[in-house]
Amino acid sequence: MVMALVACASAPTPSPSPTPPPAGPATAPQPAGEPSATAPPAQAAPAEERATAEPTNAQPDVEALIQEGIAIIREMGSIMEGIVDEATARAAKPRLMELLRKKDAAMAGFAAVKDSVPADQRQAMKKKYEPELDEAMNKFFEQNKRVMQLPGVADVLRRMRPR
């Protein structure tokens, strides 16, 4: 179920690691109160720090993807909990749509890396995260069932996915 979480739940596609800013000419100090046209160049971390701070592979952290997925599902459940009528459904719809987009991006990111995780690690992650995921999913589905029975709400929330 944990693997289904990320496959069904979410996590934003990890962004590439930031590249250090290019070294450039130093800018002259600006008089107090005047904005600088360009910010001073950022100082690079010492080589030893960079070596330990940057991952040696470009693989995203699969556990972080799972945790993000669980967080998205929890947030969706909490938002659904606050829907009591058509007006609150309309107010909640933009955030729910944003979370669905995040979930879809997370699923794509997870699908790209899930096969690289050894079976024993997948099993350990399943054991670790499945109870948390099941709780979040149950709350979401319970709330979804409830709000879809409220007058006018089903019509508001029915078309949440962009075509």
Image (tube, rainbow, N blue to C red):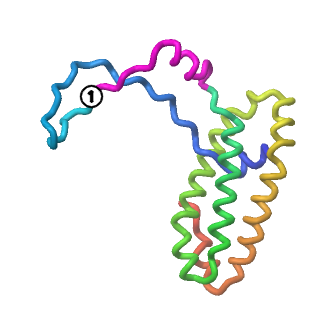
Which quadrant is the C terminus positioned in?
bottom right
Q: Residue at x 15, y 39 (%)?
A: 32
Q: Is residue 36 left or right of residue 43?
A: left
Which percent across, then down, holds residue 117? 76, 29
Q: Depth check: give the residue in front, 89 or 18.
A: 18
Q: Which image quadrant is residue 154 in?
A: bottom right
Which percent across, then down, holds residue 61? 66, 33
Q: Depth check: give the residue in front, 115 or 20.
A: 20
Q: Residue at x 74, y 27 (%)?
A: 116
Which residue corresponds to mark 1?
A: 40
Given the current orientation, which residue lies at the most extreme bottom position? 151
Q: Residue at x 57, y 54 (%)?
A: 101
Which percent across, then down, holds residue 63? 71, 38
- Amino acid type of disc 1? Pro
Q: Is residue 163 visible?
A: no
Residue 51 magenta-highlighted: yes
Q: Is residue 39 above or below residue 78?
A: above
Q: Which residues are magenta?
A: 40-58
Q: Is residue 155 above or below residue 122?
A: below
